[in-house]
Image (spheres, helix red, strand yellow):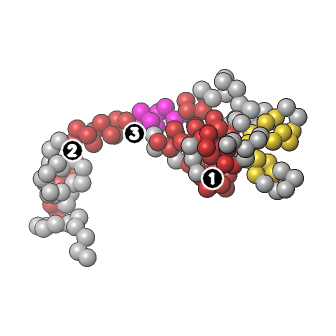
Amino acid sequence: MEQPQLRLRSMTVLLTPSQVAERAGVAVSALHFYEREGLITSTRSAGNQRRYTRDVLRRIAFIRTSQRVGISLAEIREALSTLPVDRAPTKADWPRLPRRWRTSLDERIARLQRLRDDLDGCIGCGCLSLKRCRLQNPDDTLGAQGPGARLLDPS
């Protein structure tokens, strides 16, 4: 059974950590982590319990989606810091956040495509010192160090 929502500010519905966690699909500990990292904020009830505004759900969705595509927490924090603090972000506020990442995401996609294409020649070979290995030994730089394995951990 869902807990009742508290109204601590006029016309603002505040959610408990468990309500936010359930609706966002994250653990309560993740909410606390996001808050420590400055990604989301909460208010406190009269009993000093955390309460979240509903717009935190959209922020969490943005955080999780951004992390899935490899955006760092620092970059996410910077993007979220551009959102208004005096009101819930509107539909118009959200599209501009990921625009700043377009170039770096395009570069990452290109690197991943090169990796995918280069792996075709490496899978199963087990040798990372081939003269033509563009992943671990571009231009056979390891060959200049003499014969034998150079990348294996001796322990």
**Residue at which label 2 appears:** 119
Q: Which is nearer the N-term, disc 2 or disc 1?
A: 1
- Marks 3 and 2, the one that precedes in the sequence: 3
- SS state under label 1: helix
Give, as a three-letter code, the residue at label 3.
Answer: Arg
Instruction: Name the one closer to the observer, 105 or 86.
Output: 86
Pick the front one: 114 or 76:
76
Distance between the Cα atoms at labels 2 and 1?
40 Å
Label 2 sits on a secondary structure element that is: helix
The quadrant where residue 48 appears:
bottom right
Query: What residue sits 17% from the left and 48% below the top?
Result: 123
Q: Which x, y percent locates residue 75?
A: 57, 44
Q: Position of residue 96 (x, y in %)?
A: 61, 28
Q: Are marks 2 and 1 in contact (CB under 8 Å)?
A: no
Which region shows up in magenta? 100-108
**As drawn, 95 above or below 78:** above
Residue 123 visible (yes or no): yes
> Circle 1 sits on which residue?
28
Q: Name the residue nearer the viewer: 125 or 57.
A: 57
Marker disc for residue 108: 3
Which residue does the image show at 69% across and 49% down from the upper left?
A: 17
Give the amino acid at mark 2.
Leu
Residue 101 shown left or right of residue 46 in the figure = left
